[in-house]
Image (spheres, rainbow, N blue to C red):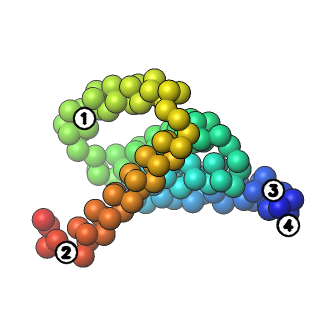
Amino acid sequence: MDRMKSHWTSSALFLGLTGFAAGLANGLLGSGGGTLLVPVLASCRHLEQHKAHATTLCVILPTAVISAFIYAKNGFMDWPLILKITLSGILGGVTGALILPKVPTGWLRAALGCFMLISGGKMLWTCFFMPPGF
């Protein structure tokens, strides 16, 4: 059975479906592809946690660029806000990438799990308990 699972998670179909789901999440929701890919790569593909994070960034980058281009074409970009946030976002990305190798795998998994739970909980809370337009 384990051999069958390994074959399935190595198949082009599984990887294609995973990539499609990550791209769909990014394109439709503006994020989420990475939070889908990291656990799949770490658990199903048995990729070491640090490599799963790095691989995910390389997969998400082109999907984010293409999605952003389509968002811009449809007039959904707030350019002044983007310019205000981008520089500090780049600085945060560089800092995180430099810190990543020093973070133990267990802490990395726990941090990602907590981030996903808190983000999901906040989104659900806002959806159900906040007035529209708040």
Q: Which SS class for mark 4?
A: loop
Of badges 2 and 4, the one in the foreground is: 4
Instruction: Kindly identify the residue that appears in the image at 36 percent across and 62 percent down.
Output: 120
The tag on residue 85 is 1
* Quarter occupied by residue 1: bottom right
The residue at which mark 3 appears reads as 6
Of badges 1 and 2, the one in the foreground is: 2
| Crowding near the residue tagged with mark 1, few <14, some 14–19, many ≥20 C-alpha atoms within 10 Å | few
Real-space CA distance between mark 4 and mark 3, rounded to the nearest whole angstrom: 9 Å
Give the mark, 2 or 4, whose residue is nearer the N terminus.
Answer: 4
Real-space CA distance between mark 2 and mark 4, rounded to the nearest whole angstrom: 45 Å
Decide if residue 27 is in sight here. no
The residue at which mark 4 appears reads as 1
Instruction: Kindly identify the residue that appears in the image at 49 percent across and 32 percent down.
Output: 103
Give the mark, 4 or 1, whose residue is nearer the N terminus.
Answer: 4
Q: Which SS class for mark 1?
A: helix
Quadrant showing the C terminus: bottom left
Q: Amino acid at mark 3?
A: Ser
Real-space CA distance between mark 1 and mark 2, rounded to the nearest whole angstrom: 28 Å
